[in-house]
Amino acid sequence: MDRLKQRIIGITEELAGIVVKYRRELHSHPELSGMEKETSAYVAAVLESNGIEVRRNVGGYGVVGLIEGKGEGGTVALRADMDALPLQDAKKSDYASKVHKVMHSCGHDVHTAVLLGTASVLSRTKEYLHGTVKLIFQPSEERPPGGAKSMIEEGVLEMPVPSAIVALHVFPDLPAGTIGCKPGMMTASSDRFSVVLYGRSGHGAKPHQTIDAVLVAAKVITTLQHIVSRRIDPIRPAVITIGTISGGTAENIVADRVELTGTVRSLDTSVREELPRLMEQVIKGITLAMGAEYEFSFARGNPSVVNDPKLTSLLMESGKEILGRDRVVEITEPTMGGEDFAFYAERVPACFFRLGTGNPEKGIIYPLHHRHFDIDEGAIPVGVKVLAWTTVRILNMSGRVER
């Protein structure tokens, strides 16, 4: 096993420059959720160039690759998401997005490149693999209800059935060269809502003759925040965020319609169930008091990602073996971010870990979903090593991870 570990390290370092090029190509040409046509074609071409069997257009533009080991055993699935966000890239770099108002500001280009690199490494060491590696390149993670559900519905967790699934996500709060993970709950549930507020328009100089939908919206926005601070147990985290607001037609016309959209995050099932009722209670009370009307809709999104304890322990030990013990960070608290990887984790023992990408000395300081977001590309081979070595470790256990 030690010889195989050194071979994985050597191949990864040999391919590091190529995998960085994958990332830069993907970063330069991002595609929004449900529109990943060129990205999926690129992914499929790279896999096929490595002699990997490929299935295209799974659950939309999803791509699935299979690497068959020489020995008999189980199946391990590895997943990466491919879609970008509707944001203008403000970086000054050769690989900045060439697509107007579309950007990989959540690091899915990195996830895809890392998995392509892992596929290359494992295809070159498949004579040592006891079982099958299923490579899942998923579309539409950023657009609810998410591409995971559609890929699952089209059989991505069947033929062969994986006994474990692993994925990573870039994390600028951890330094490049490290990974972080924890057993149990890793992310929050993620739901979404919209509110349409109806008033009565009129002249801006005669507000007494109107019902100002903008003013109603202002009160709704501020009062919704009181739910978290005053109606929810403070030891049970929750987030209500208004992401968009639109309304009005001119500066001297009182608006008769304002629309709000937002996201709701929670870690507790009972809190998740209670939040829609509390939100509508606030909206109804304010609109009634101000003579307005409303429409409220609430849509369930992703449940929390819950990491399998035994698989997580194996991944962390694998990370220590291939990176060094000081490069593996045990995360103590979940994040309020949401991930549709949760749908895989509901069906298969799963581990979702963080890939450290931050480096203040290189100016890599911006958070996810920021216009200047970037990573220290030295993190890319780190992700490849951990995914590849963890896969080998699982398959050498005959692919079984007991819950």
Image (cartoon, grey):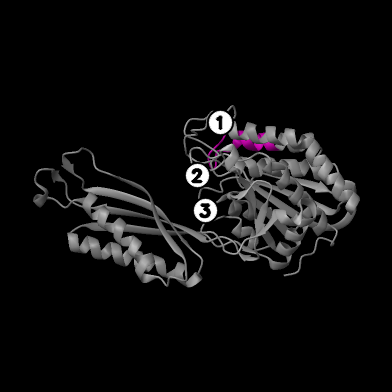
Label located before the other in sequence (1 or 2): 1
Q: Nearer the viewer, mark 2 or mark 3?
A: 2
Q: Quadrant of residue 248?
A: top left
Q: How dense is the environment of label 3, judged by Cα within 10 Å: few (below 14), some, or many (20 and up)?
A: some
Label located before the other in sequence (1 or 3): 1
Are discs 1 and 3 less than 8 Å apart at CB?
no
Q: CA distance from mark 2 to mark 3?
A: 19 Å
Label placed on residue 96:
1
Magenta segment boundaries in residue numbering: 29-43
**Does 114 appear in magenta?**
no
Q: Where is residue 319 drawn, in percent x and y?
A: 75, 55
Label placed on residue 145:
3
Are discs 2 and 3 less than 8 Å apart at CB?
no
Q: Where is residue 325 drawn, in percent x and y?
A: 75, 57
Label placed on residue 118:
none
Report the residue marked by disc 2: 369
Residue 382 appears in the picture as rendered = yes
Q: The N terminus is located in which quarter?
A: bottom right
Lateral position of residue 184 relative to residue 18, left or right: left
Task: Choose between 7 and 325: the one closer to the eye.
Answer: 325
